[in-house]
Image (tube, rainbow, N blue to C red):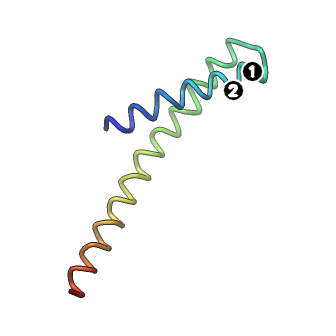
Amino acid sequence: MNKTFSFAVVHFTVAFLVTWLITGSWVLGGVIAMVEPAVNTVAYFFHEKAWGRIDRRRAAEAAAIS
């Protein structure tokens, strides 16, 4: 979960800065920085879980072959 949290911090910062640089709006930057990364952070967490399952399945298949 620490990896997910650090990813969220980076993502919030990038989302805010990109929006602010494009629009010049601190408010819009803040709104986008809260909504978009929050959704992506949840998606990332489940993405990592899915890849963990894939890695475990591949390891089990490799062990069965050996």
Amino acid beneath label 2: Val
Dot 1 falls on a residue whose secondary structure is helix
The C terminus sits in image quarter: bottom left
59 left or right, relative to 21: left
Residue at 46% across / 31% down in the picture? 8
Find disc 2 in the rendering and name its residue: 18
Residue at 57% across / 28% down in the picture? 35
Instruction: Tell me residue 43's x, y (percent).
Output: 48, 45
42 left or right, relative to 16: left
The N terminus sits in image quarter: top left
Is mark 1 in CB contact (under 8 Å) with mark 2? Answer: yes
Find disc 1 in the rendering and name its residue: 21
Instruction: Tell me residue 53's x, y (percent).
Output: 32, 63
Is the residue marked by circle 2 packed among few (<14), some (14-19), or many (20+) residues within 10 Å?
some
Residue at 54% across / 26% down in the picture? 12
Q: Quadrant of residue 14?
A: top right
Amino acid beneath label 1: Leu
